[in-house]
Image (cartoon, helix red, strand yellow):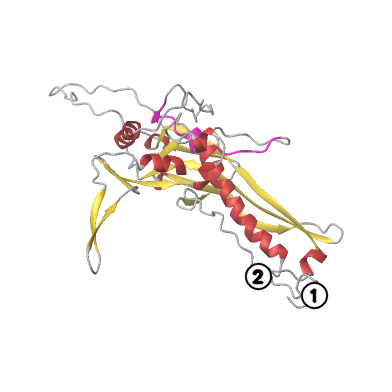
Amino acid sequence: MPANTLLTSTPIVRLAEDVEDKIYNFRPTDTPLVSSIERTSVDAVFHEWTADTYRTPNPANAAIEGADATFAAQTQPLTYSNRTQIVQDTISVSNTAEVVKKYGRKSEIARLKTKKAVELKKDIEAAAIANGTAVTGTSGVAGQMRGLYGWIATVNSLNTGTAPNPITNTAPVLGTLRAFTETLLQTVIRTVYENGGDAAVLMVNPQHKVKVSSFTGNVQRTNEVADKTKMNTRLQTAFTIYGHDFGETKVVPNRVMTGAGAGLINTAYVIDYDKIKLGQLRPMQTQELAIVGDSRQWQMLTEVTLVVGQESTLGAVRDLTATGS
């Protein structure tokens, strides 16, 4: 190298920056449960509804000709309830931070609003799945909705744990953890079907999805796939539809269920989207708060609850290891 060659490490005064004018964020945003269920309006922080069932069919129901009518005891429907939960986040940005030139965004306030809307939706997803009880809000305690983990009382596959009781607002108890097997799943699907459910969806954490794909059943795991030049054989190492005697169940991995908590990583849910609703007391809203000094403050929130029309049509496989093995 010739003497006195000018190098960028010399350094050269005022080199131009080379910064991409964008912000990358490929982290997951999907919320399979709350994105798939209907919304319904609720009018109070304590929401109630009623569900009824039919008696067991009686093949001996035969009356004697001409006999007087006899009257059986009548049963009453059950009343269910849930509490609303305020899910919120805040933004505080100085006026200087908002107006200075930035890479990847023009407005810091706009960026944060968009980001927090996604985060709040994922918070709702986690609460609607994992919360074991409803919590009554007070001046010092935040109200909380009961999630699927605390709702499914009738159809459960348990090891040593106990099921919840949504009527008495009793939380489930996690038992000794065990492997996720096809027999456990089939038993829950069958019982859900007998109770009037369709078992349309199996919602699991990603590791349980891998475990479910190892279930053998009666599936042929290879098939012929034709292309323009030859016939290729494809090995199917996973499936998304689990066919069984009572229909088909779509296996849905939920990335929110990678979080901590027995209701997320230790439980698999057999559900029908049409039997669950997200009750909205206050839809998602953004409100600017009072100005504090040389900055602007915002609050984003929604107030929601989970409405499970009839929990006996849903099912859960509980007390599972996080990996299912």
Secondary structure beneath disc 2? loop
Query: What is the x, y in percent for residue 173?
Result: 51, 25
Let me know if residue 145 is in the magenta part: yes
Q: Which amino acid does label 2 sit on?
A: Glu
In the shown orientation, is residue 103 left or right of residue 180?
right
Residue 20 is labelled as: 2
Magenta segment, which residues? 141-158
Query: What is the x, y in percent for residue 152?
Result: 44, 33
Which quadrant holds the C terminus?
A: top left
Q: Is residue 108 visible?
A: yes
Query: What is the x, y in percent for residue 93?
Result: 77, 60
Residue 134 is labelled as: none
Q: Residue at x 30, y 50 (%)?
A: 236
Viewer-proximal residue among 63 and 59: 59
Q: Quadrant of residue 117?
A: bottom right
CA neighbours of label 1 inside 10 A, class few (<14), some (14 to 19), many (20+): few
Separation of marks 1 and 2 at Cα, in angstroms: 21 Å
Q: How many numbered marks, from 0 up?
A: 2
Question: Mark 1 touching mark 2, by CB under 8 A?
Answer: no
Mostly what secondary structure, the magenta segment? loop
Query: What is the x, y in percent for residue 186?
Result: 31, 34
Let me know if residue 43 is in the magenta part: no
Viewer-proximal residue among 78 and 293: 293
Viewer-proximal residue among 215 and 29: 215
Q: Which residue is identified by label 1? A: 12
Secondary structure beneath disc 1? loop
Q: Which residue is drawn at 43% across and 34% down?
A: 324
Compared with residue 4, is residue 218 higher up or lower down, i.e. above or below? above
**Furthest residue toward right:** 293
